Image (tube, rainbow, N blue to C red):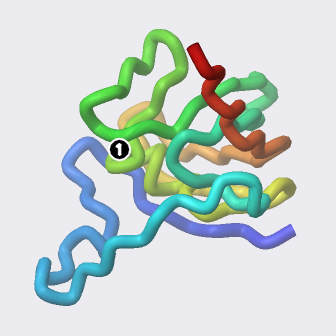
Amino acid sequence: MRKVAVRLSAQGAHPAARRPAASAQVIDPQPGNGRVDVGERVRALDSGERLELELVGPLESDASVGRISVVSPLGQAILGLRRGQIAEGDAPRGRLQFKILAVEAPKPARAA
């Protein structure tokens, strides 16, 4: 298992988010590639508690129903991880560890 250390804080932008916009690249999500990406559902384990999350854009987020923004500290911590990997970080409630149990690609939209 590979551990990925990420600082989770209320202020905290991921270091990559601090790069100048001129160096930014637009990357299309690649659902179904086994890595956590926008639009995918993630089952994770947090201190013995099972979580079901969906990684979404910042305007779609609603933590009360498990829709986590990709720009949030948790979203940044799990982005790009695969099943079995662990994200670690500091949060207001203490040190957190999230083990990725499963990554599920979004279901295709039904035609009307």
Res 54 quadrant in image:
top right
Q: Position of residue 22 (x, y in %)?
A: 12, 86
**Quadrant of the image containing the N terminus:** bottom right
Up the image or down, 29 lies above or below 42; here it is below
**Quadrant of the image containing the C terminus:** top right
Residue 11 is left or right of residue 85, and the answer is left
Name the residue at 26% across, 42% down. 10
Q: Position of residue 55 (x, y in %)?
A: 51, 39
Q: Residue furthest bottom?
A: 23
Q: Residue furthest front?
A: 112
Up the image or down, 19 lies above or below 89; here it is below
Name the residue at 67% across, 61% down. 81
**Number of disc labels:** 1
Q: Nearer the viewer, residue 77 or 26?
A: 26
Up the image or down, 52 lies above or below 2; here it is above
Residue 61 is left or right of residue 29, and the answer is left
Question: Element under label 1?
Answer: loop
Up the image or down, 21 lies above or below 70; here it is below
Name the residue at 48% across, 25% down. 67
Q: Position of residue 31 (x, y in %)?
A: 66, 53
> Mark 1 sits on what residue?
72
Res 27 quadrant in image:
bottom left
Task: Answer few, some or many: residues within 10 Å of disc 1's Cα (few below 14, many 20 plus, some between 14 and 19).
Answer: many
Q: Position of residue 36 (x, y in %)?
A: 64, 53
Residue 83 is left or right of residue 93, and the answer is right
Q: Nearer the viewer, residue 55 or 108?
A: 108
| Type of amino acid under label 1 | Ser
Name the residue at 76% across, 45% down. 103
Q: Nearer the viewer, residue 87 or 96?
A: 87
